[in-house]
Amino acid sequence: MIPANYKTHSDTELVSLCLKGDSQAWEALIMRYRRLIYSIPVRFSFSTTDAADVFQSVCLKLIEHLHELKDETKVSAWLITTTTRQCIYVRSQRFRETGGSEEEFEEAPDPTENLEDIRVQIEEQQTVRESVDQLPDRCRQLIELLYFDPRTPSYEDVSQTLAMPVPSIGPTRARCLDKLRAILRRHGIK
């Protein structure tokens, strides 16, 4: 479990602590960017196993190259680039292993054709995640349950989890989304 104070540290602070050998800072950094890293192999339509392999490879590369990061505020950009390159590498390895023909390879949709579009979209998704983390606890929990929980809980489930009456969920959600929109506008997302 990551101590709450690590969640409030900036990327620059976390990188500095990681470089000093702070394992909790490392865990906080990985937890902050785990969805970002996993989202890229998903765009490449990788299996769960391949996505996990990419995740591990990228984390290892981050450990190996963290000291070389020239701008600690660009961790997400570095991760996007590194993960995309790792996905391209894994994809080409799988292609070679299966002995596929060039024609088969060209017929499959190629996510590398629009890498800049993918990069921009992934950065925006990460900004949304970071903005949700900036919400007050109750709003963050509600938004995560309603929009990020893979189980898609019902209002009754949300009511029980948050000890909130079902009729209050809709209005509270609207207020929380307004707060989230304000944070997103400050980050340049409309």
Image (tube, rainbow, N blue to C red):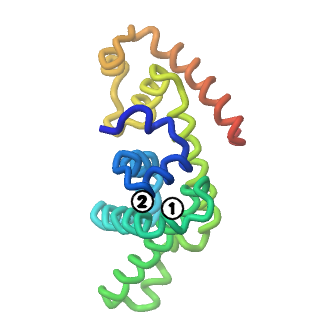
> Which tag, 1 or 2, sits closer to the chain's start?
2
Question: In the drawing, what numbered circle is on residue 162?
Answer: none
Crowding near pointer 1: few (<14 within 10 Å), some, many (20+)?
some
Q: Which kind of residue does numbered mark 2 sit on?
A: Val
Is the Cβ of the residue at disc 1 closer than 8 Å to that at disc 2? no
Q: Quadrant of residue 19?
A: bottom left
Question: In the drawing, what numbered circle is on residue 42?
Answer: 2
- Residue at 36% x, 35% y: name it: 3
122 up-or-down from 96: above or below: above
Residue that numbered label 1 is attached to:
79
The number of numbered badges drawn on the structure is 2
Crowding near pointer 2: few (<14 within 10 Å), some, many (20+)?
some
Judge by depth and name the residue closer to the eye, 112 or 18.
18
x, y percent for residue 57: 36, 68
x, y percent for residue 43: 47, 61
30 with respect to 78 (left or right): left
Q: Quadrant of residue 148?
A: top left
88 up-or-down from 29: above or below: below
- Residue at 34% x, 12% y: name it: 163
- Residue at 34% x, 38% y: name it: 2
Toward the front, the furthest residue is 20
Q: Secondary structure at mark 1?
A: helix
Quadrant of the frame with the C terminus:
top right
Between the residue at mark 1 and the residue at mark 2, the CA separation in whole angstroms equals 15 Å
Q: Quadrant of residue 24?
A: top left
Quadrant of the frame with the N terminus:
top left
176 with respect to 83 (left or right): right
x, y percent for residue 95: 37, 84
For discs 1 and 2, the disc positioned in front in the rendered view: 1
Q: Which kind of residue does numbered mark 1 sit on?
A: Leu
x, y percent for residue 124: 60, 48
- Residue at 52% x, 20% y: name it: 173
